Amino acid sequence: MKQVYINSIGSISGQKTFDNNEFLNDIVDYEDNVISVIDPIYKDYIPPAAARRMAKGIKMGVVASKIALQDAGLENVDAIITGTGMGCVRDSEKFVSAIIDNDEQYLTPTSFIQSTHNTVGGQIALELQCKGYNFTYVHGSNSFESALLDAKLQLENNEEHNILVGGVDELGDHTVTIHKLINHIKPHAVKSSELLKSNSVGAVFAEGANFFVLSNEKQASSYAEVTAVKLFNTLTKAEITKAATDFLAENNLEVSDIDILILGNNGDIEHDGYYHELQSGPFKNTQQVYYKHLCGEFNTASSFGFWLASKIIKTQSLPESVKLNNIKQASFKTILLYNQYRGENHSFTLLKQC
Amino acid sequence: MSKGVAITGMGIISAIGNNVAENYHALINGNKGISRVKKIKTNHVNDIMVGEIAFTNSEFEQQLHLSSDNNYSRTAFLGVVAAKEAIKNAGITDINAYKTGLVSATSVGGMDMTERYFYDYLENKATQKYIEGHHAGDSTQKIAEQLGIEKSLVTTISTACSSAANSIMLGARLIKSGLLDRVIVGGADCLSKFTINGFKTLMILSDTYNTPFDENRKGLNLGEAAAFLVLESDAVVQAENKTVLAYVKGYGNANDAYHQTASSDNGDGAFLAMEKALKVADFTPADIDYINAHGTATGNNDLSEGRAIIRVFGEHVPDFSSTKAYTGHTLAAAGAIEAVYSVLALQNNVVYPNLNFETQMKEFDMTPQLELKEKPLKTVMSNSFGFGGNCSTVIFSKEQ
């Protein structure tokens, strides 16, 4: 079985992450309950006319992919695997409202076409002229991890050599409005740096795209090795600790082997308890890190956590802004990530220095 | 990666039947499930025909003993019904006795409720329960819950009309890698105004019965359906002394990388998908006894797929037919529907007729199978293609 490496990264998020030479040098501290991305100059990567036609999700996905390919020094990949919770949700909203508002008349196909969940994956394939394997996973907060697992299996079995894997989701106005109604979005603006002190239900909604070239061939510029990823459709709070330590045991590791634990806390007092189980339990003496105050919450936000872990391992540096506690650490060799959303679709991911 | 992937159970609900037996009966008797749409109020009612399932949502609620405060989309209802039949058919009593996962596929997801309550959400609190049911993973979570699958790998694939074929592919890979012992794979999609109007704007909906591979084909009929298959490892089959219905022998996925909605003239993606599937199965084209084609009856698909089939099989194209004339095009579920039909073909040694065919296509001289044909079958190839250039092929076989 081959090892699987993260050979490159490309990130578009609420922070200025599209420049791979930087690592959260200047943090934008928002005060809101919905955060958009900081846009790169899209026309540096795609012709302006094409960019204008593209949905935001497509634009973010295509450009994050191109950044990742450049970073890996590749012209193309063997396969493209995308995770997205909602796809190009703005086009879905646009088409539904057009159907209702115009009583099924005068409709044009563009927004229908772009609303298809695999549009981003398909558009990346078109851009790269990549005729290889192309999958899109759409399973809530495990969309990205499903893509990651699929890629890992194929690389381990040497079916492919370089696979582009990513998570992408865009914000849509109507979706935001209705999620405010059901309190999935925080009722008030929250300062990013004070997200975990918000003492309210719901999350700060956001968008973003994080793409990676995974490979079974290590190169000098590789970021880390992906050792394991495991998905759970359900877990209770009481089961989290055991699930985490079992996962480590399956990979011949103990809690003391983990240099950093990266958690998906989003400040929702009803659901952050899952993270608290690990924070105050076996990992209380482990360096703990969070990130959703920087990138916000969306179905594929955990791909930002994956980006963060990759960066930490490669640069061997840990930005102050992501620390949940302060444990002196000589080096960052092994990172465990844990994420869930509203108590469902939990995942553990393990990265190692390579 | 040499392990076998056995199919030990199947479940289905479609416009031609509420279970496997009813579907098979309709297939061999040439009974179409295509009619005018009844359950969706649309201005296009007289311009289109659909493959609609007779049960109403409240009938499904009763069948599944759900309380009235449930937030099931029709996609979820269909999915649960088909998945439960598959589990029963596989003789599974304790779902968690083996490492069991679920891979479902959908493109519509909870859109039927979203389009119904889109503006009501803003004013009517009672409708807001459906907001959480919109995303594509929701129906899969509900199916897992209904089957009792807990603390396991549950995921959803959405690659438009090839989605469920891709669920089968992932399921096979998960078993071969040893990650899971058993995977329930399939897909579900209900009819919606969203897809009716979407395909209408693309001008690929027929106003009459769809006619796959016919020179004068006018487009597709949309259908709603769900189907699931139980895939099990050799170890489970042996330990439980299971009856194996068929094996997933080969699979291939490729991207046409040509156009967001149209297939390339030569069917590059389709060609590559079929070639890959043959390679994984370690078959030559001559090993394929029957092709259950994607055959949507759109001008573009049938030409592109036909050319790709000729590129793979040359002068020796095996018997082929599309079953879309029976069910309509069931979008993300199609790959699973046709997987069930492929396994039934293997079990019963029959090739289904390609209904509604009248005129030979000009571009090539291959003709689909027009009458029900009985012949010994060892292998069936099933094609599923979708928007975004997504092309998938799965090969089923009697022998491992």
Image (cartoon, grey):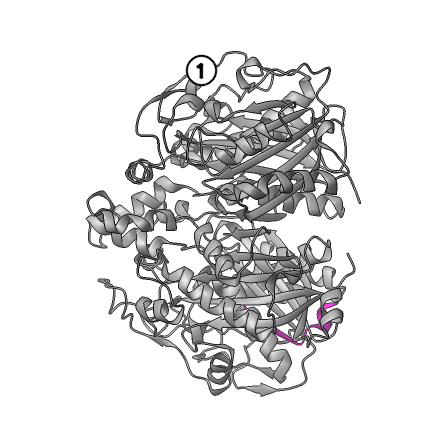
Label 1 marks which chain's residue? A
In the displayed structure image, the side of residue B24 where residue B34 appears, left or right:
left
In the displayed structure image, the side of residue A80 where residue A195 appears, left or right:
left
Q: In the rendered view, tell whether residue B68 sits above or below residue A26.
A: below
Identified at 44% across, 17% down, the residue is A193
Which region shows up in magenta? B284-293
In what quadrant of the picture does the N terminus of chain A appear?
Answer: top right
Q: Secondary structure at mark 1?
A: loop
How far across and down, in percent of the image, does residue A75 sit?
A: 65, 33
Viewer-side residue, B378 vs A151: A151
Q: Amino acid at mark 1?
A: Val
- Verify whether residue B287 appears in magenta: yes
In the displayed structure image, the side of residue B343 where residue A155 appears, left or right:
right
In the displayed structure image, the side of residue B393 where residue B176 appears, left or right:
right
Identify the residue under disc 1: A28
How far across and down, in percent of the image, does residue A237 sit?
A: 53, 41
- Verify whether residue A152 appears in magenta: no
Query: Which image quadrant for residue A230?
Result: top right
How far across and down, in percent of the image, does residue B396 sit?
A: 66, 70
